[in-house]
Image (cartoon, rainbow, N blue to C red):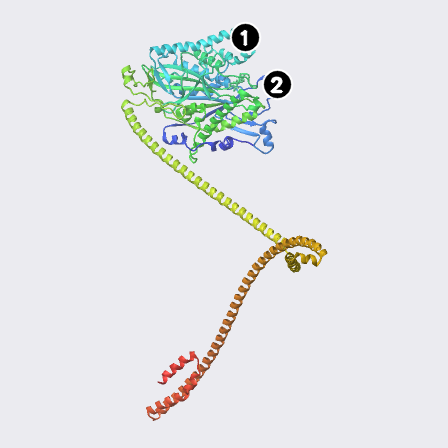
Amino acid sequence: MESTPCELNVDNLHKGVLSELSTISSVSVSAQVEQADHAEQRQLRVYLRVRPFSKEELANDEDQGCIVLENAEVAVLQAPKESSSMKNSEKGVGQSIHKFSFSQIFGPDTTQTDFFKGTVRELVYNYLDGGNALVFTYGVTNAGKTHTIQGSENDGGILPRSLDVIFNHVKGRQYQHMDFKPHLSSDVQYLDSNQVKQEKSAKAAVFAMLKEENDRSTKSNTSAASHASLLKSTSNASLSFSSVSYDQTVEADSSLSGGEPFQFAVWVSFCEIYNESVYDLMEPLPTSRNHKRNALRVCEDHSGNSYVRDLKWINIFNTEEACKILKIGNKNRSAACTRMNQTSSRSHGIFSVKLLRIDGTQVQKISELSLCDLAGSERCNKTKTFGERLKEAGNINNSLLILGKCIAALRQNQNPKVKNNYVPFRESKLTRLFQSIFCGKGRACMIVNINQCASTFDETLHVMKFSAVAKQVVQVIQPKPLASIAPRLVGKDGKMLLRHAIVEEEAMDSLLLEEELLDEEDSEADMSILPQEELLNIIESLKEKLVEERRKNLKQEIEIRREMGNAMLEQLMENEENWDKQVEELKESYEEKLENTFDMYKDAIKQHAYQRAMEDVEDNYVPIEEFLAEQEKVMELERKYTEMELNLKAFQRNPSEAESMDGANSLQSATLAHKSEVRYKELWEANSSSEKLCEEKDQVIKSMEKTIKALNEAIQEAGDNFLEKVEENKRLEEKIAQQEEEMKELHRSCTAQEALLSELRVQFETSKKCTQGGTGEPKAKKGILANLRATVGSPAKLSKKTVAGTSSSTRKRGLFK
Ligand SMILES: Nc1ncnc2c1ncn2[C@@H]1O[C@H](COP(=O)(O)OP(=O)(O)OP(=O)(O)O)[C@@H](O)[C@H]1O
């Protein structure tokens, strides 16, 4: 199973990456192709460099034949046993063999000279002719990126060789005044004498750092840690371009200058992007840990090109000075030990060289060559990274991921059928700085560094896949006339100077103040490249636009506020309605509950009252026999009482008589009287209670009688009504029978009438025949009438008819009249 770059599409490599990208296109290579007819289309050069095994690696059995170079352009990657790729392919996911093609492949035996000649030299020539160039190395840590760019003591990499070519080219034609300095992205600033002095002292200060460092390193060489951290810088410090000249390998092409009397100024800068912050490597490191390094801003100039604001640019005159800058930069560069590489670069280092072509007092061209040593694209678990190192790894991976996204988007945009994708250059500092080159303002070349170790196969495969996409990117380089436009010249305070002449202070004052237009992040734009009148017009139109925009914004704001107000009001009203509803519902439910409770109590009270009433009735109930017996007793007692009263009266009237009557009886009588009195009282009380009871019973009886009476009356009434109805019913039945009888009678009469009518018809026919037979008309007439009378009969017959029949008989009588 094989995979080639052709089979590798972007979706496979960066699954989901493109979906994240906005569809708004800021950069479109395909659009540029249409616009710039004369633009040079050039596939991004991607070179592969395979480094040789180290002794340790061979000892560790890292050589498992993972990388096979088929020819100068094709490399085959064969997954080793322990790699994830092999395990996946065994599970049926992915392949174990992958094939990749490159612009050119450089094997482990390639010398630095051959590599330089085969890759960057052409770009440097173009650079010397005024073109911009970017070279960046990509690969896992310990793959040889730094070695490729910087090289070693006696065998320099592409950077010292490029510098050597540059200085060979400008040899004897160097501009000595230091008063033209690179400004913004591609402008030039004219420095006055004071500024030149400042520049010189700044340069001296930078070089002084190296001297201090050399002094320190010779004094203290005991600390192992400081030794490790300075390993890279010391190794580079030994680089000496003065002793090694690459003239034998790279001849400066004198034809490039065309023999014209130009002078050149070479300015260099060295910065790093560490944890998404840009730091000037020419700035001395803070002495104490409390002080942080000063991070620089990435801005955009008037033409949208990115540059690092306040980055130090140093005017150098030979490769020796360039070497010093490199050494100082390496010293300051954030290097930390990882398990994989003792001097691993933890940041992206960018060394830039600006070349100013000066014709007398004018700067004709400015071109820039940038060499970027990207940080290693390692995986965190492999490198056992923690804490600060993990954060670094995250930022490194992120910026490399954005670089991948940009390359993938550029690749996608080349397809005319595909909608232009947004290229996310602005998502990382690294890609922001690369943007202009990728958008056609220079040539780019990518160097892919790999090692052949089996243990890092999976990472290496990832790098190869990335490079396969990059190789498919077609760069559309802007045509020469555009590139050769003279750079904009600004004065000491950054104000624009008129081209072809250094203007006086007064002239500068008359120029409009340049306005820095910062973008949404931190970029700036500069409009002062245009002539004064044009600028004034632009300012006027911009002012109008501004007013218009403000008006529009205000309108929008009012509209938004109104809409928001309405929305809020609606919301409030809705809320209020809901509250009202809720309150209403609550009220209703409470009312219902109250009503239910009230009904419940009412029922309970009724029940209670009924029970009490029933209890009372039960308590007071006396059977009628008992009542009669009691009444009889009462009557007996009354009788006795009357008798005794009579006796008492008699005794009062004649006591002696009574005494004489019976002396013994008198005492008995007295006792009896007393007893009777007590008994009387008792009986009296019983009587009164009985009377009371009787009264109550009477009342009950009365009320019951009343009810019975009312019921009787109602029954009577109902009975009456019933009888009435029965009567009425009878009457109606009779009436119906009568009417039925009448109907029958009428029916009978109708039948008779019909018979008469048919008889009359017969007679009429016979009389008609007789008339036709010679008899006179009157006779026939009399005959008809007589027949009719005879048929209809006497009036007595008709008198029997009913009321209904009367009217018809009346009509018939009318007929006889
Ligand atoms: N072509 C080569 N020939 C001989 N030795 C090499 C070659 N390339 C790299 N090396 C050696 O391999 C080791 C690692 O190389 P280097 O430091 O350049 O890796 P790197 O990719 O820059 O790593 P990092 O990303 O961690 O900085 C160094 O000791 C270097 O000298």
Q: Secondary structure at mark 2?
A: helix
Closer to the camera, 260 or 329? 329
Q: Which residue is mark 1?
A: 221
Horizontal and vertical percent for residue 480?
36, 24
Q: Quadrant of residue 390?
A: top right
Q: Which residue is mark 2?
A: 59
Residue 707 vertical placement versus 487 (above, below):
below
Q: Is residue 543 left or right of residue 391?
A: left
Residue 510 vertical placement versus 779 (above, below):
above
Chain-order first, disc 2 or disc 1: 2
The amino acid on which the numbered mark 2 sits, given as a three-letter code, is Ala
Residue 217 visible from this viewpoint: yes
Residue 648 vertical placement versus 319 (above, below):
below
Q: Secondary structure at mark 1?
A: loop
Q: Residue at x 49, y 73 (%)?
A: 732
Residue 177 visible from this viewpoint: no
| Residue that lies at the very extreme toward the bottom in this rendered image | 774
